Amino acid sequence: PASQCNTGSIQCCDSVQQATSPDATGLFGLLNIVLTELDVLVGITCSPLSLIGIGGNSCSASPVCCENNSFGGLISIGCIPIILEL
């Protein structure tokens, strides 16, 4: 189902943008991240979203499934927007 994420936990991001957007490229520069593929979506300011106990864990921004969440939530790379089935 769309509410599952095969690459890790579902993330809730403040925004989801193309890797070539000014916000994303600025963060890549600050974090010394070099992308070889720029045709991907990135999530900015993300946190894991647990579907258990949804009351306090809803996502009013952009729920996504991302391939690389190893940058402390500041930026997640390779994101795909998902639809939460509650």
Image (cartoon, helix red, strand yellow):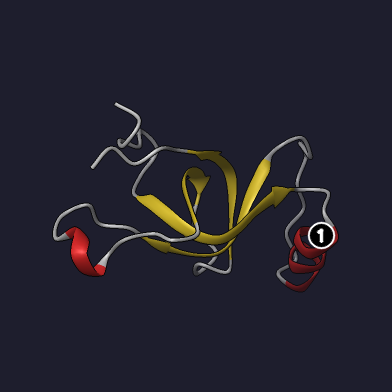
Position of 1 compared to 60: left or right? left
For this rendering, which residue is in front, 44 or 82? 82
Q: Is residue 9 above or below residue 70?
A: above
For this rendering, which residue is in front, 5 or 12? 12
Please report the residue visible at 64 percent of the width from the left and 50 percent of the height from the top: 42
Question: Badge 1: how crowded within 10 Å, few (<14), some, or many (20+)?
Answer: some
Q: Is residue 71 above or below residue 67?
A: below
Please report the residue visible at 28 percent of the width from the left and 37 percent of the height from the top: 85
Asked if residue 70 shows in the view, the reply is: no
Please report the residue visible at 52 percent of the width from the left and 60 percent of the height from the top: 13
Position of 62 compared to 32: left or right? left
Q: Position of residue 32 (x, y in %)?
A: 75, 66
To which residue does mark 1 refer? Answer: 25
Please report the residue visible at 76 percent of the width from the left and 36 percent of the height from the top: 37
Q: Secondary structure at mark 1?
A: helix
Q: Position of residue 79 (x, y in %)?
A: 56, 42
Image quarter of the C terminus: top left
* Residue 40 sits in quarter: top right
Asked if residue 45 shows in the view, the reply is: yes
Position of 32 compared to 4: left or right? right
Position of 5 compared to 34: left or right? left
Q: Position of residue 62 (x, y in %)?
A: 51, 53
- Amino acid residing under circle 1: Thr
* Residue 58 sits in quarter: bottom left
The residue at the far left in this view is: 53
Q: Position of residue 18 (x, y in %)?
A: 74, 46
Q: Is residue 38 above or below residue 52?
A: above
